Amino acid sequence: MSRTGELVLGVISALFTVISIIALTFLVISGSAAFQDESFNAEIQQGLLTDPALSGQDAEMFIDALPGMFSAFGWGIIIVFVISLVLNIIGIVAVTKNKKPKLAGVMFILAGLFAGIISLTSILLYIAAIMCFVRKSPVQSVDQDEYYKTI
């Protein structure tokens, strides 16, 4: 039985994940560079200091912590997407030539969870996982004449 559908969905979702990793890496690097710009920091500081809900000390503390939080959170998301990509690749390898479709289904579900609960990538991975679990391998029928000759 051919598992072309699962394979195609896995490869498409892997490509989406790679594109997301590249885009997020660019965003984190450019965002970290933006925090190095004094005019950008001055605008953020002015906006926070004029907020009546924040005291001056809270705004200063938030301004000092913002670049670190942005960088750490961004790199954390990138690491989660890389884990999703690795699980997706394991699932693709497991589904090729109908080797281990159950393992591929589990890997696709885990990769979908790491890619985001309700994203296009995760939906494609969930569909591939369902196909891995639902489609059964054909049963090899034994020719009756051959069966009786061996008895």
Image (tube, grey):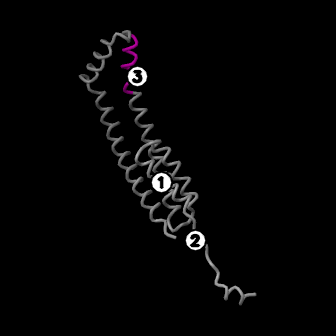
Q: Which mark is residue 138?
A: 2
Secondary structure type for disc 3: helix
The kind of residue tagged 3 is Ala
Toward the left, the furthest residue is: 39
Can you identify the residue that label 1 sits on?
Answer: 127
Name the N-terminal-most of marks 3 and 2. 3
Where does the magenta region start and end?
57-67
Going 39% across and 10% down the picture, which residue do you hit? 57
Secondary structure type for disc 2: loop
- Mark 2 to mark 1 CA distance (whole Å): 21 Å
Task: Say few, some or many: other residues with alpha carbon within 10 Å of mark 3 (under 14 / 14 to 19 / 20 or more).
Answer: few
Instruction: Tell me residue 91's x, y (percent).
Output: 51, 57
Toward the front, the furthest residue is: 144
Instruction: Tell me residue 138's x, y (percent).
Output: 58, 71
Can you identify the residue that label 3 sits on?
Answer: 65
Looking at the picture, tell me which residue is in the foreground, 132 or 34.
Answer: 132
Asked if residue 113 lies in the magenta stretch, the reply is no
